[in-house]
Amino acid sequence: LQKWVASAGYQEYVTLVVPHGCGEAPTTSVRVKIPDGITIVVPEEKAGWTTRVVKRKLPAPVAAEGGARLSEVGDEVIWSGGSLPTDRLGLFTMLARMPDQPGRIIYFKTIQTCGKDEVRWVDTIAEGEPAWKIWATPAPSPFIELQK
């Protein structure tokens, strides 16, 4: 992620940075799991790519802005059909309402596909551990630490 901290309870732009392909193969798909607690997710369209939001039903409706009730939320954002060369930087952006839980670390587990190959950026750390420890994992998940 381009930004590793965000304000709890606020809408923030989240930009996933894809700095390389998979070996010699270009990136052809980026799939991001939206963390629990995010009630709004609006991905930015990326020229040459198809953008899709996969929804999931909530066990019970939750309150939203303006008195509305949400019964489903974004579960995954998938950008596919493009081709990001291995020597080019790709930025994949979305707007997300952060959970109102200062101190929590939320993970945007990501699968990067390059043709038939895939790289899974899904490793996390135990709750309560300092955020820097994520970098000691073999395949660190993109994350955001929520602040007041």
Image: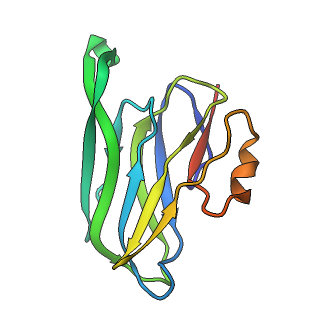
The quadrant of the rendering that contains the N terminus is: bottom right
Q: Position of residue 104 (x, y in %)?
A: 62, 31
Q: Is residue 43 visible?
A: no
Q: Residue at x 26, y 15 (%)?
A: 68
Write down the quadrant of residue 139 in the picture: bottom right
Q: Could you tell me which residue is drawn at 74 percent across and 58 percent down?
A: 136
Q: How is the image coloured?
A: rainbow
Give the residue at the far top of this rendering: 67
* Number of marks drawn: 0
Residue 139 visible in the picture: yes
At a point 75% along the width and 50% down the height, the residue shown is: 133
Q: In the picture, residue 60 is in which quadrant?
A: top left
- Describe residue 37's horizontal placement relative to residue 61 as left or right: right
Please give left or right for residue 112 compared with residue 1 in the image: left
The spot of residue 119 in percent (x, y) is 48, 69
Eyeballing the image, is 16 above or below 148?
Answer: below
Q: Position of residue 74 (x, y in %)?
A: 31, 39
Q: Residue at x 27, y 22 (%)?
A: 70
Q: From this view, report whether residue 61 is shown above or below residue 36.
A: above
Q: Does residue 101 appear to the left or right of 69 in the view shown?
A: right
Q: Is residue 56 above or below residue 8?
A: below
Q: Nearer the viewer, residue 108 or 45?
A: 108
